[in-house]
């Protein structure tokens, strides 16, 4: 019964987030809004952590299984991905370097 309550709270936050996303004048993922809503509710203690702990733990424990459909769907696009593999790797490495430079610069600025 506890897991049903945990999943109900998580799904309610997701659905409210998706509803909020439809009201926005720009495109924004509803799942992110739902996650932010859940964070707000937990940080203000409007919802106790115990209400989502076990359900969240169960989802995290089996998260690898949730990526299997995505990985299988990507196999249908191997030719497209292989054509742009250099751009994908370059973008990932460029983003990593950019993030490291910005975080390093901010850290230096904060410490001085």
Image: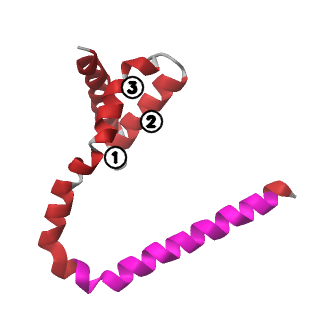
User: Residue 80, position in %: x, y?
Assistant: 20, 79
Instruction: Say what secondary structure mark 2 lies in.
Output: helix
Decide if residue 4 is on the left or right side of residue 37.
Answer: left
Disc 1 vs disc 3: which is toward the camera?
3
- Disc number at residue 29? 1
Q: Mark 3 = which residue?
A: 53
User: Residue 111, position in %: x, y?
Assistant: 83, 56
* Mark 3 surroundings within 10 Å by alpha-carbon count, few (fewer than 14), some (14 through 19), many (20 or more): some
57 drawn magenta: no
Q: Residue at x 27, y 29 (%)?
A: 11
Q: Mark 2 = which residue?
A: 36
Dominant secondary structure, magenta: helix
The disc, 1 or 3, on the residue closer to the chain's N-terminal end is 1
User: Residue 6, position in %: x, y?
Assistant: 31, 22
Instruction: Say what secondary structure mark 1 lies in.
Output: loop
Decide if residue 77 is on the left or right side of residue 25.
Answer: left
- Boundaries of the magenta span: 81-109
Q: Residue at x 45, y 17 (%)?
A: 48
Instruction: Say what secondary structure mark 3 lies in.
Output: helix
User: Residue 62, position in %: x, y?
Assistant: 26, 42
Q: Residue 55 lies in what quarter of the image? A: top left
The disc, 3 or 2, on the residue closer to the chain's N-terminal end is 2
Decide if residue 46 is on the left or right side of residue 64.
Answer: right
Q: Quadrant of the C terminus?
A: bottom right
100 drawn magenta: yes
Which residue extends farthest front?
61
């Amino acid at each position: 019964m506890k897991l049903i309550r945990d999943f109900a709270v998580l799904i309610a936050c997701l659905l409210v987030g998706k509803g909020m996303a439809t009201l926005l004048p720009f495109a924004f993922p509803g799942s992110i809004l739902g996650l932010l809503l859940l964070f707000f509710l937990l940080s203000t203690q409007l919802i106790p952590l115990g209400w989502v702990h076990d359900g969240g733990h169960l989802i995290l424990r089996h998260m690898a299984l949730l990526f299997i459909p995505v990985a299988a769907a990507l196999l249908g696009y191997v030719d497209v991905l292989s054509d742009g593999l250099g751009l994908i790797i370059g973008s990932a490495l460029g983003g990593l370097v950019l993030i490291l430079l910005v975080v390093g610069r901010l850290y230096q600025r904060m410490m001085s």
